[in-house]
Image (cartoon, rainbow, N blue to C red):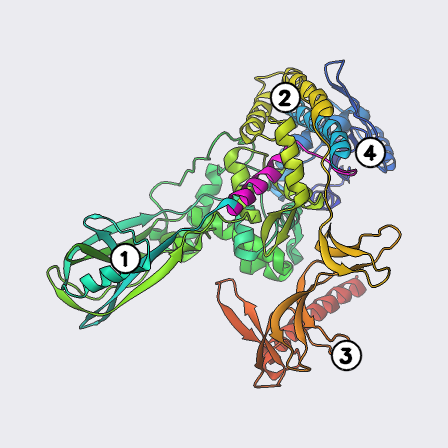
Amino acid sequence: MGKTLIIVESPTKAKTIGKYLGTNYTVLSSMGHVRDLPKSSLGVDVENEFEPHYITIRGKGDILKNLRTEAKRADRVLLASDPDREGEMIAYHLKGYLANVDEKCRVEFHEITKDTVKKAVKTPRELDMDRICAQQARRVLDRLVGYKLSPLLWVKVKKGLSAGRVQSVAVRMICDREAEINAFVPEEYWTLGLVLHTDEGSLNAQLARIDGQAAHIPDQQTVENIMAESAKQPYTIDKISKRERKRNPVAPFTTSSMQQEAYRKHGLLTKKTMQLAQQLFEGISLGKQGVVGLITYMRTDSTRIAPEIQQAAREFIVSQYGAEYVPEKPRVYQSKGKIQDAHEAIRPTDVSRRPADVRQFLTPQQYKLYKLIWERFVASQMSSAIIDTTTVDIANGRYTFRASGSVIRFPGFMQLYIESKDDEGDKEDLGLLPALQEGQTLSAEKLEPKQHFTAPPPRFTEAMLVKTLEEKGVGRPSTYAPIVDTIIGRGYVVREDKHFYSTELGMVVVNLLKEGFPDIIDIDFTAGMEALLDEVEEGKRNWRQIVSEFYQPFAQELAKAEAELEKVDLEPEYSGDNCELCGRPMVYKLGRYGKFLACSGFPDCRNTKPIVISAGVKCLACGGEIIQRKSRGGRVFYGCSNYPQCKFVSWDKPIEEACPECGKQLAEKNLRSGQTQKVCPNADCPSNAHKKKRKKASADAVMQKAAQQAAKKIKK
């Protein structure tokens, strides 16, 4: 057998695959894309059927030269870039540049394990030109929008701005939500709780119906009238309903659902989740087992699982949990909407490789994500949970109060995994109710009225934004993370307290685009374009025709906007303070890590300073004021206003209470459960001794591992 050169995108992947194959294979990395449209010009010939003009990416010349040299030495060249549209385009550019590449040169690794890699290299295929055309159409469309709209924004708003085909729609979603919140008028309403006495304890109920209709209590006077009338009448058990309810597991992860759940459960941002998933996919060194890819390819919109993997999962579940935890038939999940279905769902490459088995080889964040993927997949193949639900209706004249409770009779998949929700009010109402009988009369311990106000729609978190983009059909699995990154980087939105807020600049740009380019900023139009690009990939549409149909009306709108749209003056937002260096007013600016103060005399005066926000707490050490600041990385921390004389600092918000152990000022830590916990920020406090032990144990483990590796090298 002759020499074979395999080219992948990532050096990590090249290293992993190289260990699986014999000496007849050389595995090298292209370090991502090697050719692209030029940055200095449009790079698309609109007069010649939108022919793209690709050039070698700066800095890739030596890489391509080395690949060409190695390709000439090899008897066969295989192109193994990622198994998606972008990967197909990379393979296409490499094939055009290298010699000695056969027609059947493309291989795909949907998971990087020894068996799958060896199998894949034996069955190369031809390049998928439909997939390449779809990616080319997307790239050309994005270039036309970006390079035609951005100069308009420079003229009409300010220099340095840019617009994107998909990102602009995401900004619009956030701006529209901001407008909804600002326009929202809260409405008052009340709820009425009831605590009843039984021989076995108390029973909590809620007013559910008035005269047979759903209860609505608009104000305090109404609730007081109900309480007065209710107190005069007996509380009688009218109806007890018991039913068995099955709760089914959720599907294994797609890219979108993985990003959402990683954010909700572990606070991982979309970009970080994809970085960690890439590492788990490309391979982790598992000691004596060598380097192993732990998960399948992480850019997918499919919930499909291969039959042989399902069978392996079922056998594993029986061995670990028992036969009753496996449903009669393997579970098949239907993906929502139109999907590409090019890959399986995201799953572990080996279901028997439990998170605990590999924890020592993973970073804490890698472990969290692998555990999440593993548990989600295994749970998706398990039996339904069986929940007994009891509902009790309590009659009180015109009023019906309701109590409910649920008991898990058989946990099924819930033994392992329960999906998080954006709306935490959606939690299961679990708990036993006391023994009751229909017709039984109970005595009231108390009535508990509560005032509420309707809330505006919530601002988007990353998880909510990704979920909405997917539901609306805007973007695709590979684009969610770049979308979030881009709209923050451009200053169109900011992220504060995990929620997105539109900036004034974002509002101005969105309003301008709405006026001049209603299609570009329209959610349904953008989703429709994504669907057309999918049809190109399916071989149903010509990519040049789609671009042409888009560009003709776009060019007309562009010419009209250049002539008719008025220039928008962005008024500086003054802080009310003057610069201590030159005396000119200080203004608010938006930087990489949020807002800060800068001198309005820039560039003559370059004075900047952080925005100081009072925490409403006094420093117990010196009597100064605790203020909120931001680190260079954008992380919020708290310090004393008398710094540097007072060195008090805490990552968590301080409270006016001293630590009983060391006397330092305590802080309040927010837990993932939504509750708070008092903590001492003093690392040397006896109350933090357990943390030191853990840290020392971790450090000792690292040193021991390093010593073992050093000993192995010496032995060799």
Above or below residue 31? Residue 389 is: below
Alpha carbon separation for disc pair 1 and 2: 66 Å
Q: Quadrant of the N terminus?
A: top right
Which label lies toward us, 1 or 2? 1
In the rendered structure, the answer to whether residue 198 lies left or right of residue 514 reads left
Identified by mark 2, the residue type is: Asp
Q: Which mark is residue 645?
A: 3
Question: How far apart are the two marked residues, 4 and 1, measured between alpha carbons?
Answer: 71 Å
179 part of magenta stretch: yes
Percent x, y of residue 27? 75, 39
Where residue 359 appears, x then y in whole percent?
59, 60
Q: What residue is pinned by disc 2? A: 130
Within the image, what quadrant is residue 57 found in? top right
Q: Which residue is mark 4?
A: 57
Q: Which mark is residue 222?
A: 1
| Foreground of the two, 150 or 672 | 150
